[in-house]
Image (spheres, grey):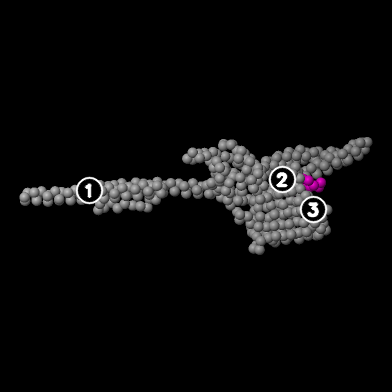
Amino acid sequence: MLYFSKMYVVKFLMGTLIIGQVAELIHYINRSNRDIASFLLSIRHDDFSTSFQEKGVGKSYSELRGSLNEITDQFKRVRAEKESNFQYLQTIVKHVNVGLMCFDEAGEILLMNRALRNLLHKPHLGQIDSLRHIDPQLLEAVQQLQPGERALLKLHIDNEPRQLAIQAVAFKLQEKGYRLISMQDIKGELDAHELEAWQKLIRILTHEIMNSVSPIISLTATIQDILAEDETLAQAEAAEDLQAAMAAISKRSQGLMHFTEAYRDLTRVPTPQIQPVDARALIEGIEVLFRTKMEEKGIAFQLTLPANALLLEADPELIEQVLINLFQNAIDALEGRDGAAISVTGFRNEDGKAVLQIGDNGPGIPKALQEQLFVPFFTTKEQGSGIGLNLSRQIMRRHGGSISFLSEEEKGVVFTLVV
């Protein structure tokens, strides 16, 4: 009887032990499953802030949690490296001087860097079709440009002339097609090369002309002296005609020398002596200079400047020369027009540079002539020399600035100086 009692006790204890071990095993498995589930959920949501305590839970369980922590730390490092690379690329895209735009197959613009926003004067564009509101030519060029191709486009953005070099690159990410467009305004570089070419041509022409004319002047002077000193020649029947011919040749040759010397000024623009120049004082001084002439011709004048002083970083004498040329051109263009007016507006643009706009309500510049306006020796005036605007452009470039214009026939022209 006692034997059977002891057997029951042993069985009870063994059963209790087995149940306890099974319960502990189930608890261990559940806890492991919860940790693994928590780990996988963190991966799914890219949340790697969770950590697992390794001590006090048994050797195997500690090893499991240690492994999970190592994997989590590795994900953290990969993510930190990924974010670092992303920030690096974002910084490059943000500060590069080339305008960049990326859009998908649906035409949604996903990226637009600062350079492009400044170039297009738009803080944000949602769809590629929005380019139509800037210029229909721009939208057409972007849509038709094939990957690897390059296009040049002339257009005006907010009344400012632009010459854009546009390139396209196509790529795929996760089976989705994208297109990256780069835009760069190369007008300044083209103008610089054009000016350099004209200066070289002018230097060559003036050099050759003066080398050819100088001997002619010398020879005519010698012949005139011979005719005057030799009595036999002086009494000859054709002597008077010969003297007159020599005098005409000499006079014309000297005139050509003076003409050539004047055009040498196009290659002799001095280095600007930069200093702060008050725009109001500068413009008012020019207005006083032309006041009498404008009153005689019935030309009204309007000056619009910001309340705070607008300072130009410029050489006052050279900038004054540019403004005098523009005022004189405006006055000539307004000859005989009713309600004639000249306006000057000053402000700072988004880049912090000073801008002066000199406009008139004259007949404007015909489109056929606009391309030639800054070409040396080209003029629409009967008495014009054709060097004023070209010289003005050189002066502005020497200042690191620019001169441009916008004109509509019978509505006038506006010249814009940026310095």
x and y, in percent, of residue 146 in the image: 58, 36
SS for callout 3: loop
Residue 334 marker: 3
Kind of residue at badge 3: Leu
Q: Is residue 8 left or right of residue 329?
A: left
User: Around disc 1, counting alpha carbons within 10 Å, would you say few (fewer than 14), some (14 to 19), or many (20 or more)?
Assistant: few
Whole-number angstrom distance, CA of label 1 to CA of label 3: 105 Å
x and y, in percent, of residue 338 in the image: 82, 55
Kind of residue at badge 2: Phe
x and y, in percent, of residue 108 in the image: 56, 45
The residue pinned by badge 2 equals: 374
SS for callout 2: loop
Magenta residues: mostly which secondary structure? loop
The residue pinned by badge 1 equals: 22
x and y, in percent, of residue 83 in the image: 44, 48
Q: Is residue 137 left or right of residue 147?
A: right
Q: Is residue 401 magenta?
A: no
**In terms of image quadrants, where is residue 343?**
bottom right
Residue at the limit of the structure toward the front, as seen here:
1
Give, as a single range, the part of the protein colored magenta: 379-390
Whole-number angstrom distance, CA of label 1 to CA of label 2: 96 Å
Which callout, 1 or 3, points at the residue further toward the start of the chain?
1
Residue at the limit of the structure toward the bottom, as seen here:
307
